[in-house]
Image (cartoon, rainbow, N blue to C red):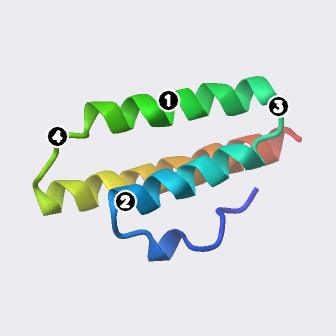
Amino acid sequence: MAPLPGAELVQRPLQLYRYLMRCCRQLPAKGIQEHYRHAVRQSFRVHSDEDNPERIQQIIKRAIEDADWIMNKYKKQN
């Protein structure tokens, strides 16, 4: 599974959240989708008090890279 279009447009946390939730919908099984949705929500709760713009951009970049890796992982399994 290739990364969803629009990853390069993600600049703010809310955009990242929506992007990651769209990625979750592309995963093959409901159980897998629920697992990653839960992980995304937890991560947003953990980082909700982050106010350093540089750190926020680091988190966004890493989250997109991780999502791409996960999407590719499940692509290879199918």
Between disc 1 and disc 4, the foreground one is: 4
**Alpha-carbon distance for marks 4 and 2?**
18 Å
**Alpha-carbon distance for marks 3 and 1?**
16 Å
At a point 65% along the width and 62% down the height, the residue shown is: 3
At a point 43% along the width and 50% down the height, the residue shown is: 63
Q: Earlier in the sequence, mark 4 or mark 3?
A: 3
State the residue lying farthest toward the left: 52
Q: Earlier in the sequence, mark 1 or mark 2?
A: 1
Mark 4 — residue? 49
- Circle 1 packing at 10 Å, graded few (<14), some (14-19), many (20+), is few
Between disc 3 and disc 2, the foreground one is: 3
Q: Secondary structure at mark 3?
A: loop
Kind of residue indicated by mark 1: Ala
On screen, 53 above or below 23?
Answer: below
Mark 1 — residue? 39
Mark 3 — residue? 29
Q: Earlier in the sequence, mark 3 or mark 2?
A: 3
On screen, 48 above or below 62?
Answer: above
Between disc 4 and disc 3, the foreground one is: 4
- Circle 3 packing at 10 Å, graded few (<14), some (14-19), many (20+), is few
Kind of residue indicated by mark 4: Asp
Q: Earlier in the sequence, mark 4 or mark 2?
A: 4
Residue 60 coordinates in the image, percent (x, y) = 35, 57
Horizontal side, residue 77 vs residue 52: left or right:
right
Mark 2 — residue? 61
Q: Earlier in the sequence, mark 1 or mark 4?
A: 1
